[in-house]
Image (spheres, rainbow, N blue to C red):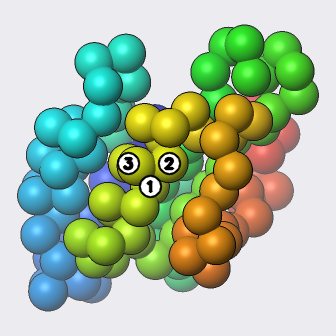
C-alpha cells in the first residue's frame, strides 16, 4: 500500500481536521505483517487528496489484478474499510465493499504509465 504524503496529501494546511499521522498508524497497526504501508512523494492526484493506492499481491497481479487508487481518504471509516478489504485479500482476491467504490479514483495519466 502506498500512501501519498507530500504537498497536499497529509497536509495540515489543506486538511487541518485530519490526523494524518494517525491514519498511517491506524493502517500499520490494523494490517497483517505481510502488508507494507509506505509513504510516497506526490502521486499527482492533488485535487483528490488524501490519496492511497492498494497494490495486489504478486499472485493476484499474475492473474490480472491491478492497483486500486483511492481519493479523499479523510476519515477513519474509510481507512478502516480499506484496511479490512486489504486484510481480506484486496485487489483480485476479495470483493471490494460497495462503500469503498465511492472513493475509487483513476490513476493520473502520468502515474499510470510508470
Question: Is residue 35 something one can see in this rendering?
Answer: yes
Quick one: SS at disc 2?
A: helix
Q: Residue furthest right?
A: 64
Label 1 environment density (alpha carbons within 10 Å; few <14, some 14–19, many ≥20): many
Label 3 environment density (alpha carbons within 10 Å; few <14, some 14–19, many ≥20): many
- Mark drawn on residue 82: 1
Pick the residue in front: 106 or 47: 106
The answer to whether 96 is drawn above or below residue 12 in the figure is above
Q: Which residue is mark 2?
A: 85
Q: Which residue is mark 3?
A: 83
Pick the residue in front: 77 or 38: 77
Instruction: Tell me whether circle 1 and circle 2 mark residues in contact (CB < 8 Å).
Output: yes
Instruction: Tell me whether circle 3 and circle 1 mark residues in contact (CB < 8 Å).
Output: yes
Q: Is residue 97 left or right of residue 59?
A: left
Q: Write down the quadrant of residue 7 in the picture.
A: bottom left
Pick the residue in front: 37 or 44: 37
Amino acid at each position: 500500500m502506498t500512501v501519498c504524503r507530500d504537498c497536499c496529501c497529509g497536509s495540515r494546511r489543506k486538511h487541518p481536521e485530519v490526523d494524518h499521522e494517525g491514519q498511517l498508524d491506524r493502517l500499520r497497526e490494523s494490517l497483517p505483517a505481510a502488508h507494507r504501508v509506505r509513504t510516497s512523494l506526490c502521486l499527482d492526484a492533488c485535487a483528490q487528496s488524501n490519496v492511497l493506492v492498494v497494490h495486489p499481491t504478486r499472485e493476484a497481479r499474475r492473474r490480472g489484478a491491478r492497483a486500486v487508487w483511492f481519493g479523499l481518504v479523510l476519515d477513519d471509516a474509510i481507512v478502516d474499510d480499506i484496511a479490512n478489504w486489504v486484510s481480506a485479500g484486496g485487489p483480485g482476491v476479495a470483493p471490494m465493499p460497495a462503500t469503498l467504490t465511492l472513493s475509487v479514483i483513476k490513476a493520473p495519466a502520468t502515474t499510470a504509465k510508470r
